[in-house]
Image (cartoon, rainbow, N blue to C red):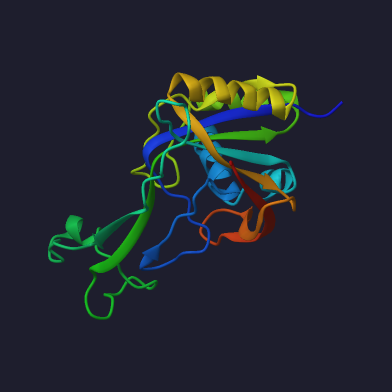
Amino acid sequence: MSEPYLLLWLEAPLQSWGHDSKFGRRDSLDFPTKSGVLGLLCCALGAAGEQKEWLETWANRDMTVQAFVPANKEGKPVSREPLLRDFHMVGSGYNDKDPWQALLIPKKSDGSKAVGGGAKMTYRFYVQDMAYAVALQAPQAELEHLQQALQNPVWDLYLGRKNCVPTDFIARGIFASKGAAFAKAQELALEKNRALSFSVHQGEHEGERLTLNDVPLQFGTQKRYRDRRVTVVKED
């Protein structure tokens, strides 16, 4: 008998799921990454540090995503909103003579002042007005523990970045099969007047195949990842 699935519902005006961006440009995929979802679970659990052993248990477990957009009167998906680009200044406007304000100004790794001053320009990208159903497979007892943590999180929950606050409950139940989990997701989508736009399956199937460097091997200050093959299947 196969292991059950926990259904997550990720909905917010803005979400951001980066997988290969650093420094001044922070891109976002069109769908949640495995590293982002596992980071969300760590926040719920209050799990800090590297978490290498815990992450190893999740490396090959199934994670399937369905993406929902607003629907028209006929229940068909409408055109998606484009990626939102936010021009962002980090560390700008602070007085470096004030010891408290100085803490908010970016510095080099040794703590000294950055070349050219502390303020840094960044461009950050967000997906807009999307909802995602994420089905995670794991043993029943572990899923029950995660569901309780998502209902009573230790730390704040966010969808990719800390300014992406969820607008609905995330944990939506444990189901015997992936099909049953996504049947519940379809009910939620109908209630919210949303339609399925595409789905993301782990492994290689018929559709657009991608290689993502989004399987976390180690969190903490020195993060490490490995690749994962996924297939994006668009709805007709």
Above or below, 120 against 61 in this view is below
Looking at the image, which is closer to me, 216 or 118?
A: 216
Q: Please state the horizontal and vertical placement of residue 156, each as a whole percent of the image.
A: 41, 35
Q: In the picture provided, is 78 more to the left or to the right than 35?
A: left
Above or below residue 21? Residue 40 is: above
- Mark count: 0
Name the residue rendered at 56%, 49% in the picture: 33
Residue 26 visible? The answer is: yes
Q: Quadrant of the C terminus?
A: top right
Left or right of 126 on screen, residue 42: right
- In depth, the one of 178 and 55 nearer the eye is 178
Query: Which quadrant is the N terminus positioned in?
Result: top right
Q: Where, by quadrant of the figure, is residue 79 drawn? A: top left
In this image, 189 relative to 26: left or right? Answer: right
Q: In the image, residue 2 lies at what x, y percent?
A: 83, 29
* Quadrant in the rendering for residue 201: top right
Out of 86 and 91, give the one closest to the viewer. Answer: 86
Measuring 44% from the left and 66% from the top, which residue is drawn there? 22
186 vs 141, nearest the viewer: 186
Whole-percent x, y for residue 23 in the image: 39, 68
The residue at the point 63 percent across, 27 percent down is 182
Q: Residue at x 45, y 46 (%)?
A: 160
Estimate the x, y position of residue 200 in percent, counting from the top left.
62, 45
Q: Among all residues in the image, which is located at the extreme bottom?
A: 115
Residue farthest along the right direction in this orientation: 1
Q: Is residue 201 left or right of residue 127?
A: right
Does residue 72 sit above or below 176 in this rendering? below
Q: Is residue 156 visible?
A: no
